[in-house]
Image: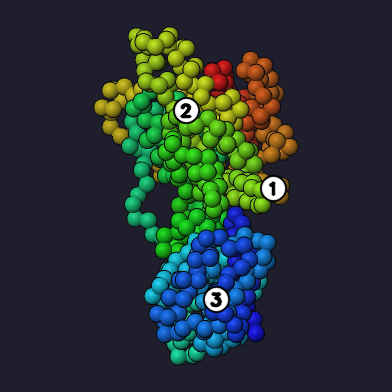
Amino acid sequence: MVQRVATVAFEGIEAKPVDVQVHVLSGQIVFNIVGLPDKAVSEARERVRSALVASGLALPGKRITVNLAPADLPKEGSHFDLPIALGLMAAIGAIPPDALGGFVVLGELALDGRITPVAGVLPAAMAANALGLGIICPAACGPEAAWAGEDVEVLAPDNLVQLANHFRGTQVLSRPMPGIRTVDAPLADLRDIKGQESAKRALEIAAAGGHALLMNGPPGSGKSMLASRMPSILPPLTAAELLEVSMIHSVAGELEGGQLTTRRPFRNPHHSASMAALIGGGLRVRPGEVSLAHHGVLFLDELPEFQPHVLDGLRQPIESGEAVIARANQRVSFPARFQLVAAMNPCRCGKATEPGFACPRMPNPRCMADYQAKISGPLIDRMDMVIEVPAVAAADLILPAPAEGSNEIGLRVAAARRVQALRYESQGLPVRLNAHAPPAVLDEVAAPDAAGLALLRDAAEALRLTARGYHRVLKLARTIADLDASAAVRRVHLAEAISYRGATDALRAAA
């Protein structure tokens, strides 16, 4: 008789159903696992054998075959340990054969029979809910699985003995409660930054509309400080966004204790990051930084120091909102609707814009162009805002802290985001921010007045705006109007939007 146990395999954040079929026959003593298992799945034989012995059971001296169906779907990860072990336990009568029929099972086994945490429990629980099944998972992942819904039965044992006793009726496993991570550490406040009022204004606009922002300035001017305070002015994740973000972090194994948080992600990878680390991929396909920053901020400090081909890999996710990793035998897609914030120095030493400084290598303009040319023109064209962040004068540092901080700015950002969400929801569009609005609707939602249209026409010719650049100016002007609580996009809004766009012209020339 073949014993069946339901589990899942992951393609991106999608959990694909997998049928674990366990067959015990008389014959040569052997333990085979088939169905395109990777190394971690093949090694499950030894973990399962030791865990069963530690739990007071022993593998029968027979021929054991485990098939992971469908056989043409690659199986990766250690979460297949528990379904294989439970299938064997049902086959030898250690638990009732029909006990597992209503569950999706996943978990890794320690050699002493404990069930240890695995990645991907939240998407697996969501898939189980869609199939009308419960889920069996490690105890540490129980708070994560409980988010799939109150109707989903969740069993989260610490070890195999607890689970066997539960099925025999000698012990009852209580349902875990959904876990929320309480973050006590306060976010860094914009009130800490003295001076840089124009940069703070740009940061507010970028946060309000989800626009890509590039800050260019000498070392010590406060670029990194400004970027690190972006999360403090962003509103918490909505319920739908919370699930999307948490499913990505679950697959990546980055949910601490199975607990979710409403704080928006802020990812700050080092400039030595590879293509697989930033975009996603690897031997076992995992989400990259662009996906881990979904519905949050991706901050790239020292932008020209990143490898050029890695930076150019950002171009497609910025436009489409997803990172696609294509392989010969599979195609995996991860959500990647992130807000890009980047910072750079004007040249390698950072002093080219200082009055009286002369570069010993070459003339200052040539040195700056040589350094900035590491960033491709198409990537610069995708930046909604490029601003200069000058060095802070000592007179600004002596002044008391500004009266307006992150709380006041965050209230304006949240109000502008609510306006945008209602606007696009009324039109039936799956976007919430101006930066993600499709060009087809800009003539309706961001149509400028007559004076603004004349200004935009002249600026498009003077700045040689591409079609993408033209649309991004309109989106940026729409966000500035939303912050101004204006239903119409006026000339003053377009003038400010063009001023942020104009700085990209010099960078494109360098590229």
Instruction: From this view, report whether residue 309 is shown above or below residue 433.
Output: above
Amino acid bearing label 2: Pro
Which quadrant of the rendered structure holds the N terminus?
bottom right
Does the image show residue 493?
A: no
Is residue 443 in sight in this rendering? yes
Q: Nearer the viewer, residue 363 or 440?
A: 363
- Give the Cα separation between the discs numbered 1 and 3: 56 Å
Q: Is residue 287 above or below residue 136?
A: above
Measured as percent of width and height from the top left, residue 504 is found at 55, 23
- Left or right, 455 with respect to 259, comes to right
Q: Quadrant of the C terminus?
A: top right
Q: Earlier in the sequence, mark 1 or mark 2?
A: 2
Q: Sort mark 3 into few (<14), some (14-19) or many (20+) by Cα contacts within 10 Å.
A: few
Please tell me how crowded label 1 is: few (under 14), some (14-19), or many (20+) other residues with Cα within 10 Å: few
Q: Amino acid at mark 1?
A: Leu
State how far apart marks 1 and 2 are (Cα). 35 Å
What's the residue type where badge 3 is placed?
Val
- In the picture, residue 318 is in which quadrant? top right
Confirm or deny contact between disc 1 and disc 2 (CB under 8 A). Answer: no
> Which residue is most to the left?
398
Q: Which residue is mark 1?
A: 429
Picture residue at 58% right of the left edge, 70% below the top: 33
| Tag 3 and tag 2, C-beta contact below 8 Å | no
Q: Distance from label 3 to label 2 (Cα)?
A: 56 Å
Any mark on residue 30, and which?
3
Which dot, 1 or 3, sits closer to the camera?
A: 3
Q: Give the residue displayed 37% in from the left and 35% down from the top.
A: 225
Q: Which residue lies most toward the front here?
A: 28
Viewer-nearest residue: 325 or 498: 325
Q: Nearer the viewer, residue 427 or 363?
A: 363
Residue drawn 62% across and 79% down? 23
